[in-house]
Image (spheres, rainbow, N blue to C red):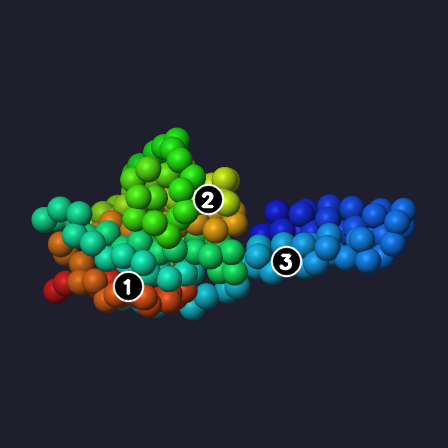
Amino acid sequence: MVLDGIYYALALTAGGAVVAYVTSPWYGLPLFILALFCLYFFRDPERGIPAGPVAVSPADGKVVAVKTESPTVTRISIFLNVFDVHVNRTPIPGRITGVRYHKGQFLVASKEEASSQNEMNTVTVEGDGTRVTFKQIAGLIARRIVFNKKVGDTVAAGERIGMIKFGSRVDVELGPEWEILVKPGVRVSGGSSVIARRRS
């Protein structure tokens, strides 16, 4: 459980209790339901991380695009709805060599334009002779991107690096040394679903 969820749930529960006491329990019920939703939304389950020369999904959600951005870059886009786990993880082990925050719009995260126009945090990880870039992208409802690491940190594959609150998108950019294993429409789980494998 992410601590934010506990704080939100406690605040909503307290508000619901006050409303129920002053008016009627029925009027406090929506706040109690929202408190339960926050506990559900901010869940952070343990995941089994696959071994080997693979890239794992950085987020739970649905693959909405697999696109060739250039002769050397393929982008995998994953859309997270409000019911998905929103904790983000690093796709590969290595060292964080770049972190850039870009201000932008808050378009619906499932739209293609969100990959280039929305507010986002771009992270680059280098390790074992490869480099992978992934982006935490804000959406229409998600207005807060959380990133808990910094440049120079060493991370393991599937390690938690932050989260995006309330509906969002994560893009992963992979080089030609990677064989893409997912297609649009497939659902993936952060840290445990393999999205690409290193070519021999």
> Which residue: 73% across, 55% down?
30
Q: Decide: few, some or many residues near mark 1? Use Cα within 10 Å; few <14, some 14-19, many ≥20.
A: some
Rounded to the nearest angstrom, the CA distance separating label 1 from label 3 is: 28 Å
Q: Decide: few, some or many residues near mark 3? Use Cα within 10 Å; few <14, some 14-19, many ≥20.
A: some
What amino acid does circle 1 point to? Pro
Residue closer to the observer: 114 or 101:
114
The numbered disc on residue 148 is none
Left or right, 17 with reference to 78: right
Locate residue 158, reporting x and y percent. 39, 58
| N-term mark: 1 or 3 | 3
Q: Secondary structure at mark 2?
A: loop
Residue pointed to by mark 2: 140
Residue 34, placed above or below residue 153? below
Looking at the rendering, which quadrant does residue 1 occupy? bottom right
| N-term mark: 1 or 2 | 2
> Which residue: 17% across, 47% down?
69
The numbered disc on residue 184 is 1
Residue closer to the observer: 138 or 105:
105
Q: Secondary structure at mark 1?
A: loop
Mark 2–mark 3 contact, CB under 8 Å?
Answer: no
- Furthest residue to the top? 103
Mark 1–mark 2 contact, CB under 8 Å?
Answer: no
Which is closer to the viewer, label 2 or label 3?
2
The numbered disc on residue 37 is 3
Mark 1–mark 3 contact, CB under 8 Å?
Answer: no
> Which residue: 49% across, 44% down?
142
What amino acid does circle 2 point to? Leu
